[in-house]
Image (spheres, helix red, strand yellow):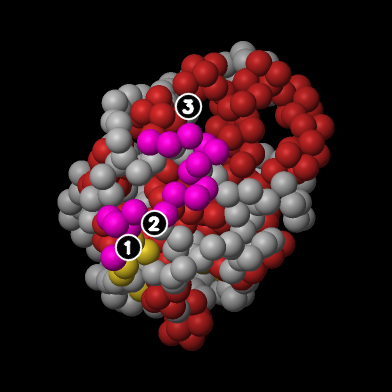
Amino acid sequence: MSSFPLIRMRSNFPTELESIMSRVDSVDPIRYAKTRNFLNGAVTRLSPYISRGVISTRFVLERVLARGYEPKNIEKFIQELAWREYYQRVWQAKGDEITRDLRFRQQHVENDSMPIEIINANTGIEAVDRGIEALYETGYMHNHLRMYTASLACNIGRSHWKIPARWMYYHLLDGDWASNAISWQWVAGSASSKKYYANQENINRYCATRQRGTFLDVGYAEIESVPVPPMLTALAIPELRTELPFGKDVTIDQSLPTLIYNSYNVDPLWKQDMSANRVLLLEPSHFTRYPVADKVIDFVVSLGKNIAGLQIFAGEFSEFRERYRPGKIYYKEHPLNRHYQGIEESRDWMFTTAGYFHSFFGYWKKCERELRPIARSI
């Protein structure tokens, strides 16, 4: 049986289930709506647990509504939960198309790499550099800093979005390829009709910095024509590689069903009362295509400790089936699970609205109709 290694990482994200539930129950959706854009705002820090399938958007919504909030009074909070579902629905509908320019060709691209000083956290923009250093240390970056970093790489540095998006995804505990890739494309103007820019005044406002005289210290009428600054001209392609320090020695009782978990599903409550083999499947092919840092693997494995009897198999799904010949296999639907074979179960969606929508707000209009029945059912 594969054992769980010692976890060594510094993070603001506990992995014990009790602590995660406490974090859910401490969410203040009113303060969140008012302050979420500020680095010191009342952000929830739930995204790593949602991304890894420990909790769902619906679980969070129902838990918050059960505290007596009316949906109309916390609409911004619900919308932000819905954004994550929206990205997943786009991925469901478009598949691998989200790894390419989705709606428009990114304009004014001059390279297919990224500025090396972004990798080095040495752009000269204090808030961004501190945010990148914190990303390396903790696996987290505030959403506004993600947008600022993407704008520097794509719109000021004129890199195509894909390489820097992969670099950021590599380090994020909440790395969700749909959310990450489409957000970068939104900034770069390939998933939206307009590029996103932030000048120094905007950054100072939301990050509590007082910088002046940087290459971003211009008005919005001028920022689109800012030449690539010297600190963003040196380019690199970061080396992104995942090492899986686990084996393939698990014990399977063929008289029991087998539940397959992965890095997007570490749900400790899923079929918790069922007698079953429980296997965390870490496929090398997946991490070759979507590499993540060691601390991300550590985080996923540590979350897996909430699942009694969970074993780790570092190999392909087909290899697992051939070696152990399990009976019934259960797994949760995900765009990266399409090669699995067995009984597919739906994820715990907040809204049933599916399909592809060009814009979030087209999607949201459909979702709004489901809010009242959800609130009534609680």
Residue 149 is one of the magenta-drawn residues: no
Which residue is the site of mark 2?
Answer: 228
Residue drawn at (28%, 62%), measured in percent from left and top? 116
Seen from the viewer's position, the closer of residues 81 and 40 is 40
Disc 2 element: loop
Tag 3: amino acid: Arg
Q: Residues within 10 Å of mark 2 (few under 14, many from 20)?
A: some
Residue 321 placement (x, y as % from top left) = 50, 80
Q: Is residue 359 visible?
A: yes
Please identify the quarter of the rendering in which residue 350 is found: top right
**Closer to the observer: label 3 or label 2?**
2
Seen from the viewer's position, the closer of residues 266 and 298 is 298
Check the image and report above or below for 68 versus 364: above
Q: Is residue 260 visible?
A: no
Mark pair 1, 2: CA separation: 7 Å
Q: Quadrant of the C terminus?
A: top right
Residue drawn at (49%, 61%), measured in percent from left and top? 161
Tag 1: amino acid: Thr
Label disc, if present, on residue 233 of the rendered structure: 1
- The reply, left or right, for residue 23 in relation to residue 224 is left
Q: Contact, CB < 8 Å: mark 1 with mark 2? A: yes
Mark pair 1, 3: CA separation: 32 Å
Which residue is the site of mark 3?
Answer: 36
Disc 1 element: loop
Please identify the quarter of the rendering in which residue 240 is found: bottom left
- Pick whichever of labels 1 and 3 is earlier in the sequence: 3
- The reply, left or right, for residue 13 in relation to residue 196 is left
Residue range (magenta): 217-234
